[in-house]
Image: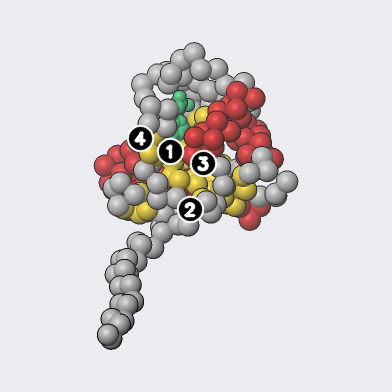
Amino acid sequence: MVKKKKRAAKKPARKAKKKAGKKKGGPAKVYLSLGSNVGDREEYIEQAIFLLEKNPEVQVIKRSANYETEPEGGAEQPPFINAAVAVITKLPPEKLLDVCQEIETALGRDREMEWGPRTIDIDILLYDDQIISEDKLQVPHPLMHERMFVLKPLKEIAPGAVHPVLEKSVEDLYEERKAEVGEKYDDELPGFKEIKGGSYDDYERW
Ligand code: AMP
């Protein structure tokens, strides 16, 4: 009797290649917004960047200049200094938020008034291309595309970064918002001026 040859197990059809994306577990590129409108505002921004950089899990790779901006959101309060930084980190988003909040607390942030004055406010704007919608954390930051004080410094360091929900670049979001709010925010006007604080070229790493 001729033995039937055992058929070689059929190779499973090759899975469609996964959409090119980030390797899981690799470091993420994250953009943070910093704001201060109490006391020595520039110093609080520097301190916040210093404390971020001091964290062994966080590497600050780029920072914008400092911009002085008019407060938004209704509450009567002094003008802000705003800046944006790019960081590389292996911390998952929730842990990074904890780090940011610890820095806010270390720098004397008082959370009594929601939109009130603050020594330092640190927001996570973009975390790679992740979309997070939890009570404690929403990424992209839900108001980032409406806030010139966020978009302007962010555009300086990451014009091509893409908002994964709106699927638009930071530069496009900035231009759209600028068209909506007119010339209110212009380097020439006191409402939005670039002030000392330097760009990354002047930025000494600790
Ligand atoms: P704020 O007044 O801007 O400091 O708001 C802080 C609160 O917003 C915290 O309770 C956070 O849990 C929450 N939150 C939600 N999404 C974000 C984000 N992307 N970055 C920072 N804080 C966030």
In which quarter of the view is residue 13 placed? bottom left
| Earlier residue among tags 2 and 4 | 2
Please tell me which of labels 2 and 1 falls first in the chain.
Answer: 2
Marks 3 and 2 in Cβ contact (< 8 Å): no
Q: Residues within 10 Å of mark 3 (few under 14, many from 20)?
A: few
Q: Are marks 4 and 1 in contact (CB under 8 Å)?
A: no
* Between discs 4 and 1, the one toward the N terminus: 4
Instruction: Give the class, few, some or many, for how many residues have Cα within 10 Å of label 2's Cα (few <14, many ≥20).
Output: few
Q: Which residue is mark 3?
A: 92
Farthest right residue in view? 206
Residue 188, x across and y down, in percent = 44, 44
Name the one closer to the observer, 94 or 10.
10
Work out how far the residue at label 2 is from the one at label 1, CA to CA, in angstroms. 32 Å
Q: Position of residue 145 (x, y in %)?
A: 34, 41
Q: Secondary structure at mark 3?
A: loop
Q: Who comes first in sequence, dot 4 or dot 3?
A: 3
**Counting residues from the N terminus, which is met first, the one under dot 3 or under dot 1?**
3
- Decide if residue 74 is in sight here: yes
Tell me residue 92's x, y (percent): 51, 41
Name the foreground residue: 68 vs 155.
155
Please name the amino acid that badge 2 sits on: Lys
Please state the horizontal and vertical placement of residue 7, each as a whole percent of the image. 30, 77
Q: Which numbered tag is attached to residue 24?
A: 2
Q: Which residue is mark 1?
A: 149
Mark 3 vs mark 2, CA separation in Å: 11 Å
Q: Secondary structure at mark 2?
A: loop
Q: Is residue 109 above or below residue 35?
A: above
Q: Which residue is mark 4?
A: 133
* In this view, 31 is above or below 122: below
Q: Which one is closest to the eye, mark 3 or mark 2?
A: 2
